[in-house]
């Protein structure tokens, strides 16, 4: 599907992006490279969306569907520990999730699609998004209209997946990645002497009770046929050995696979905390700091991705999974709440896992990911 020189150029671009990682909403250099390349290929470009986002549009001038493809661009605040000659030049920043490869793959696809413009019908939007790593950049891109004017009919994206065979393309219909809700809980008790606990209200003891009972949300409120987990990721309280502190703070992270499992976990959180605090005479405040909904693929569009990938032979290994490959969150879920579509995966081979300081994107999977996008454009935008 691609000439060797095209793949080599995409690999060089990916490694250049890897050398110059930029954190969420700081992707100025990356965005400029993307915008310039899209213009070279003949796309109409809109930049500075949601701060640093870029959208390239290809209007064929012929009636047809409006299709969108998305890649994320941001890096992570991680110091790279690899020995690659193209290692990060930006201290304390690293492309540890493969967004450099996602961006390079979609630009490679943009080249392949532009070359076939005359045989396509409809309108294509290529969305290069900032702030996927904890910034809910997808939600901001939606707020700024990337799915409108014209209205997108279907949207597609992908993520590389370490631990799966190199180049394997796989999809999961329905729930495919976890939702992520993060809360900060402050428990307010009454400070006192460690030798006189009956004169105090111990927020650490109350917090420990809450930690224990939180597991009942997953074990007794959520259906065992659905996925979900509650994690207390941090607890901060007290300093002196002989003092009962007045406050304790907990950070609670909840993962869920669909709206019903989220309702069972998140929906009962405040009532559980309130009951325990009330029983011990403590008060509390609960702040919802971050939310990404569960990523749920439309089954019919997921089937379309499978059929299209097989018909165009984008990989030697194409399959459907019957289980969720991860409970990790992905803000592509915001797009799927607005527009049907599918988020697929491409195996990265036996590499370090995502968000590791030793991770690296596998350049050999670039033609597979890009090929899937080109195949979808050919199939969905072909003349009636």
Image: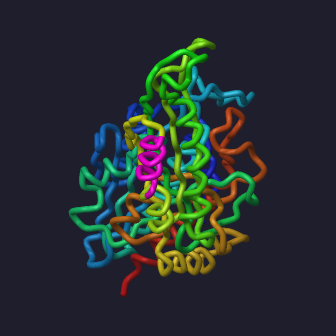
Total residue callouts: 0
Q: Percent position (x, y) of residue 176?
A: 56, 65
Extreme-left residue of the structure: 149
What secondary structure predominates along the stretch shown in magenta? helix
Q: Is residue 337 above or below residue 81?
A: below
Quadrant location of the C terminus in the rendered image = bottom left
Most foreground residue, 177 or 145: 177
Q: In the rendered view of the protein, which quadrant contains the N terminus?
A: bottom right
Instruction: Say if 268 sits above or below 235 in the image.
Output: below
Considering depth in this image, is 223 or 66 the residue closer to the camera? 223
Residue at 46%, 74% (x, y): give it.
Answer: 298
The coloring applied to the image is rainbow
Residue 366 placement (x, y as % from top left): 62, 54
| Residue 276 falls inside the magenta stretch | yes
Image quarter for residue 354?
top right
Q: Is residue 73 visible?
A: no
Q: Is residue 174 left or right of residue 146?
A: right
Q: Residue at x 47, y 19 (%)?
A: 191
Which of the two residues, 219 or 201, is positioned nearer the viewer here?
A: 201
Residue 79 visible here: yes
For the record, the magenta segment spans 268-279
Residue at position x 53%, y 73% from top? 174
x and y percentages locating residue 11 in the rendered image: 62, 45
Q: Is residue 196 magenta?
A: no
Tell me which residue sits at (44%, 33%) in the image: 187
Q: Looking at the image, which is closer to me, 314 or 148?
A: 148
Horizontal side of 248 relative to 357 (left or right) equals: left
Looking at the picture, how far across and down is residue 181, in whole percent?
46, 49
Which quadrant of the structure image shows residue 367?
Answer: bottom right
**Which residue appears farthest toward the right when viewing the image?**
350
């Amino acid at each position: 599907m691609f000439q060797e020189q095209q793949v080599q150029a995409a690999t060089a671009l990916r490694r250049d992006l890897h050398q110059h990682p930029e954190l969420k909403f700081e992707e100025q250099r990356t965005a400029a490279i993307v915008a310039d390349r899209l213009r070279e290929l003949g796309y109409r470009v809109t930049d500075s969306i949601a701060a640093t986002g870029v959208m390239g549009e290809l209007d064929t001038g012929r009636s047809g569907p409006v299709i969108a493809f998305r890649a994320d661009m941001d890096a992570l605040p991680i110091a790279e520990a690899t020995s690659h000659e193209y290692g990060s030049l930006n201290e304390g920043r690293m492309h540890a999730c493969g967004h450099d490869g996602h961006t390079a793959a979609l630009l490679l696809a943009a080249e392949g699609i532009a070359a076939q413009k005359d045989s396509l019908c409809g309108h294509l939007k290529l969305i290069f998004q900032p702030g996927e790593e904890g910034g809910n950049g997808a939600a901001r891109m939606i707020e700024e209209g990337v799915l409108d004017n014209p209205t997108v009919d279907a949207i597609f994206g992908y993520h590389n997946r370490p631990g799966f065979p190199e180049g394997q393309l796989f999809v999961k219909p329905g729930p495919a990645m976890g939702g992520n809700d993060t809360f900060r809980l402050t428990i307010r008790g009454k400070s006192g002497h460690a030798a006189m606990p009956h004169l105090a209200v111990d927020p650490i003891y109350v917090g420990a009770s809450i930690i224990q009972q939180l597991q009942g949300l997953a074990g007794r409120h959520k259906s065992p046929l659905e996925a979900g987990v509650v994690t207390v990721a941090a607890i901060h309280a007290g300093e002196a050995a002989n003092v009962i502190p007045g406050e304790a703070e907990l950070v609670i992270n909840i993962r869920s696979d669909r709206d019903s499992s989220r309702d069972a976990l998140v929906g009962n959180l405040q009532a559980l905390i309130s009951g325990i605090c009330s029983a011990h005479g403590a008060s509390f405040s609960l702040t919802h700091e971050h939310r990404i909904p569960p990523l749920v693929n439309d089954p019919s569009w997921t089937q379309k991705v499978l059929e299209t990938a097989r018909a165009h032979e984008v990989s030697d290994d194409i399959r459907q999974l019957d289980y969720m490959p991860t409970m990790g969150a992905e803000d592509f879920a915001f797009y799927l709440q607005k527009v049907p579509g599918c988020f697929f995966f491409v195996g990265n081979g036996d590499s370090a896992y995502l968000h590791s300081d030793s991770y690296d994107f596998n350049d050999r999977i670039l033609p597979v990911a890009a090929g899937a996008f080109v195949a979808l454009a050919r199939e969905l935008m072909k003349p009636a």
